[in-house]
């Protein structure tokens, strides 16, 4: 992958926003498969090169466990706002600014919360919380905003769908020799059928979630990061740009 100067630009903006002695709590949101975790990792690397300590967490860790979602009849809508323990997420983000905090972790392999992967975050210079359910600034009745900065990762819907299908197929391929993987259940299907399933999940679950909920973070974000079809950053600006 060729160097992306947009990442250096964005890293510089985050570094400039840091205040000594306090964690800069940064949210990074956007559609499923927009590349949030990849961008967060790239930013962490660039910021570390500047001498800053950075931790990246995923809001997926605050999804309700599958057993709870199944009991609530919500497993098929995983990723929608009501499938998160939002109070726990907000509490953890607020606590991260001043002291150590325990962060639960969701496994994309087992498609569930994995207690063995829980992490302890202890006051880094910058905390990047990447994932969904960060649109609470858009009038969700939250008493206080735990984020110092909110970044929205934007891309065309057609590109997002293509990236989602490719990611789904990657997990499916990886499950060939891993019976514990959530995607192992689809190994009896051929590649074309799995791609069709992924498109149906996108159209039935992830696209409606984007249009009804996720995109609400865009107009209230501090920065909107625009991506092209090749995943490169094509622009960084405010919500109105």
Image (cartoon, rainbow, N blue to C red):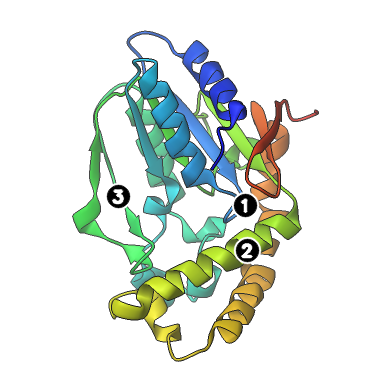
Residue labelled with disc 2: 206
Left or right, 106 with reference to 227: left
Which numbered disc covers residue 31? 1
Q: Which residue is mark 3?
A: 104
Residue at (42, 10) in percent of width and height: 19
Determine the residue positioned at 32% across, 22% down. Answer: 53
Q: Earlier in the sequence, mark 2 or mark 3?
A: 3
Residue 42 at x, y = what percent?
46, 35
* Front label number (2 vs 3): 2
Residue furthest to the bottom in view is: 188
| Label 2 crowd bin: few (<14), some (14–19), many (20+), radius 10 Å | many
Location of residue 96 with respect to 217 vertically, above or below = above
The one of 83 and 179 positioned closer to us in this rendering: 179
Number of numbered discs on residues: 3
Is 171 displayed left or right of 5 in the figure? Answer: left
Q: Is residue 139 visible?
A: no
**Cα distance between the residues tagged 1 and 3:** 21 Å
**Rendered position, 178 above or below 151:** below
Whichever of callouts 1 and 3 sits on the residue coming sooner in the sequence is 1
Marks 2,3: beta carbons within 8 A? no
Residue located 66% across and 56% down the image = 160
C-alpha separation, residue under disc 2 versus residue under disc 1: 8 Å
Categorize mark 1 by other alpha carbons within 10 Å: few (<14), some (14-19), many (20+).
many
Residue 2: quadrant of the picture: top right
Q: Are marks 2 and 1 in contact (CB under 8 Å)?
A: yes
Relative to the observer, which residue lies in front, 141 or 171? 171
């Amino acid at each position: 992958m060729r160097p992306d100067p947009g990442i250096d630009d964005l890293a510089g903006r985050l570094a400039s926003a840091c205040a000594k002695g306090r964690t800069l709590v940064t949210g990074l949101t956007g559609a499923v498969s927009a590349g949030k975790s990849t961008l967060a990792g790239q930013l962490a690397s660039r910021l570390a090169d500047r001498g800053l300590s950075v931790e990246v967490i995923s809001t997926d860790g605050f999804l309700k466990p599958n057993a709870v979602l199944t009991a609530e009849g919500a497993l098929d809508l995983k990723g929608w706002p009501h499938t998160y323990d939002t109070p726990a997420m907000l509490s953890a983000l607020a606590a991260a600014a001043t002291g150590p905090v325990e962060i639960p972790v969701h496994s994309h392999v087992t498609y569930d919360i994995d207690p063995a992967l829980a992490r302890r975050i202890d006051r880094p210079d910058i905390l990047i919380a990447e994932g969904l359910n960060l649109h609470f600034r858009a009038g969700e009745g939250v008493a206080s905003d735990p984020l110092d900065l909110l970044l929205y990762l934007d891309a065309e819907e057609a590109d997002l769908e293509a990236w989602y299908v490719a990611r789904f197929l990657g997990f499916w391929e990886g499950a060939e020799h891993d019976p514990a993987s959530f995607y192992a259940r689809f190994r009896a299907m051929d590649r074309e059928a799995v791609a069709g399933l992924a498109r149906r999940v996108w159209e039935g679950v992830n696209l409606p979630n984007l249009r009804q909920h996720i995109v609400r973070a865009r107009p209230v974000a501090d920065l909107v990061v625009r991506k092209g079809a090749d995943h490169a950053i094509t622009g960084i600006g405010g919500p109105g740009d």
